Image: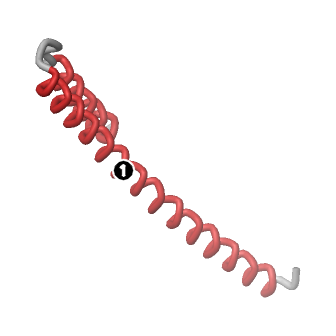
Amino acid sequence: MIETLATIDIIESALNDLNKINYNNKEETEKIVVNAKITLQTYRDKLQKEANEFEKWAEIQSNIDTSIQLEVDNELGK
């Protein structure tokens, strides 16, 4: 739930920036769009890093579980 709230905050921040656009000022518009894009890309990269770390952790835990199960099976003569 905390992650969801953080995601909402980041999206809201980017949307607030985009809502400030004055389409008559091209330079200002580009600056606001670039800043919103950077905000979203940075958060996406953070989430991707966390997902990759979790995936590595899960694989390690699975390998540990498999190893333990093999040891138990060997001890039981399976």
Percent of width and height locating residue 15? 23, 23
Residue furthest right as drawn: 78
Rate crowding at label 1 as few (under 14), some (14 to 19) or many (20 or more) other CA atoms within 10 Å. Answer: few
Question: Of 25 and 66, which appears nearest the observer?
Answer: 25
Percent of width and height locating residue 30? 20, 29
Indicate the quadrant containing the C terminus: top left, top right, bottom left or bottom right.
bottom right
Amino acid tagged 1: Asp
Q: Is residue 24 above or below residue 3?
A: above
Q: Residue at x 45, y 62 (%)?
A: 53
Residue bearing mark 1: 45
Q: How many marks?
A: 1
Q: Would you say 56 lies left or right of 42 here?
A: right
Q: Is residue 73 above or below residue 35?
A: below
Secondary structure under the numbered disc 1 in the rendered image: helix
Q: Residue at x 81, y 85 (%)?
A: 74
Q: Would you say 10 lies left or right of 73 here?
A: left
Question: Of 1 and 19, which appears nearest the observer?
Answer: 19
Q: Residue at x 40, y 57 (%)?
A: 49
Percent of width and height locating residue 6? 26, 38
Q: Is residue 62 above or below residue 52?
A: below
Q: How is the image coloured?
A: secondary structure
Question: Of 20 and 31, which appears nearest the observer?
Answer: 31
Percent of width and height locating residue 24? 13, 12
Indicate the quadrant containing the N terminus: top left, top right, bottom left or bottom right.
top left
Picture quadrant of residue 9: top left
Q: Residue at x 62, y 67 (%)?
A: 62
Question: Of 11 and 54, which appears nearest the observer?
Answer: 11
Picture quadrant of residue 35: top left
